[in-house]
Image (cartoon, rainbow, N blue to C red):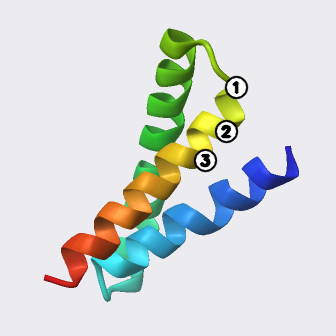
Amino acid sequence: GVLLISAMLVTPAATARMMTNSFSRMLTIAPIIGASCGFAGMLLSYHIDVSPGATIILTLGATFFLALVLRRR
């Protein structure tokens, strides 16, 4: 539970920070990333029958990694 809460606080904000330099846009993008990754992680965990917490964290991590790769181009 603690790992999920920490990841849900830090990862969307860090991902949004890589996507924009504007603080107001970051405040808009971060909750969208968090909610969409939470929904996608829950949906994916239901279909492959695994732990939802770990799946949400992996979805957030994949989103962060994707933003990192796309930013370096």
Residue 45 shown left or right of residue 54 in the figure = left
- Please state which amino acid type lies under the numbered disc 2: Ala
**Which residue is situated farthest in the left direction here?**
73
Q: Quadrant of residue 69?
A: bottom left
Q: Which mark is residue 51?
A: 1
Is residue 35 among what the camera can see?
yes
Looking at the picture, how far across and down is residue 6, in whole percent? 75, 60
Q: Quadrant of the N terminus?
A: top right
Structural distance between the alpha carbons of marks 3 and 2: 5 Å
Say what secondary structure mark 2 lies in: helix
Looking at the picture, how far across and down is residue 29, in whole percent? 37, 62
Q: Which residue is mark 2?
A: 54
Closer to the N terminus: mark 1 or mark 3? 1
Q: Which residue is mark 3?
A: 57
Residue 33 shown left or right of residue 4 in the figure = left
Structural distance between the alpha carbons of marks 2 and 1: 6 Å
Q: Label 2 near label 3: C-beta < 8 Å?
A: yes
Looking at the picture, how far across and down is residue 13, in whole percent? 52, 70
Q: Residues within 10 Å of mark 1 (few under 14, many from 20)?
A: few
Looking at the picture, how far across and down is residue 55, in whole percent? 59, 35
Q: Residue at x 66, y 62 (%)?
A: 9
Q: Residue at x 54, y 37 (%)?
A: 38
Q: Residue at x 20, y 72 (%)?
A: 70
- Please state which amino acid type lies under the numbered disc 3: Ile
Structural distance between the alpha carbons of marks 1 and 3: 10 Å
Q: Quadrant of the C terminus?
A: bottom left
Say what secondary structure mark 3 lies in: helix
Q: Residue at x 42, y 64 (%)?
A: 64
